[in-house]
Amino acid sequence: MNLKEIDFERLGRDFRGLDPNDPGVWPMAPKVAVFIGLFVATVAAAWWFDWRDQLDTLARAEKEEVTLREQWVSKKRQAVNLDEHKRQLEEIDRQFGALLRQLPNRAEMDSLLAEINQAGLGRGLQFELFKPGNDVVRDFYAEMPIEIRVIGGYHDLGAFASDVAKMPRIVTLNNIAIEGVRGGQLKLEARAVTYRYLDEEELAKRNQAAQQAQRGRRR
């Protein structure tokens, strides 16, 4: 009989006849085995009922920490560049104000239409059609389309288009079509579009209509 056989035989004797009501008198091997089993069971129970949730919470906290660090770096960068952002905002406001001043109000539209008409007459053009259309309301401004049909020489038509582009108010020429007519003259058909900003009354009506439409969608 070798040493391993003696050890197994001894272990078998240690685990036989154990009194569960008096573990204090158990041999060392059963005590160690029961201790290890209880330890493993305790760790498993702790993992299942407590540590698992804590590890999930820890993982979420670590991700949140990364996000908060990135936000802090971004806000710090913005704070460092705050003066530059303010300067850029002031420049944008100035440019927007300059553009807004190029838009006439409702009372100034008649004079603007007269200026467009006079620009054509001043170049010796013959108007066959000069018909303002209905306003198309946008966010804070309105577009007024004007159907134009004029007859004149090539250079006179080009000069008229240049005069319209140089007006202090914003006027654009769209859908341009040119064809030859009698005596070497040309006929230009186009849609001129000019813009005006909405006054306080128009803005109030527009906002009221938008609010009513929104309430209607909610019902």
Image (spheres, rainbow, N blue to C red):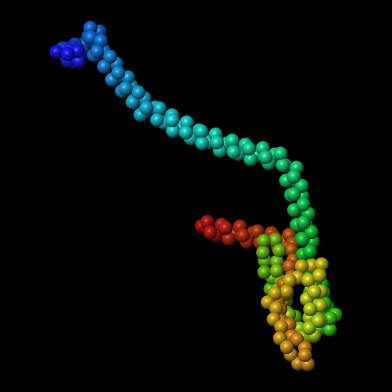
Tell me the residue at 31%/23% (across/down). Answer: 41
The residue furthest left is 1
Relative to 182, say whether 2 is above or below. Answer: above
Residue 45: quarter of image: top left
Residue at the extreme front of the image, as rendered: 2
Q: Is residue 129 shown to the viewer in this render?
A: no
State which quarter of the image contains the N terminus.
top left
Q: To which quarter of the image does residue 207 belong?
A: bottom right
What residue lies at 71% left-to-right and 39% top-to-bottom? 80
Q: Quadrant of residue 43?
A: top left
Percent coordinates x, y for residue 54 in the rendering: 43, 29
| Placement of 91 over or under 205, stated as above or below | above
Residue at x 63% of width, y 37% of height: 73
Q: Is residue 64 above or below residue 8?
A: below
Q: As rendered, which of 184 and 56 lies closer to the eye?
A: 184
Q: Residue at x 71, y 83 (%)?
A: 178
**Image position of 56 (left or right of 106):** left
Q: Residue 154, how many percent across, how many down?
A: 78, 83
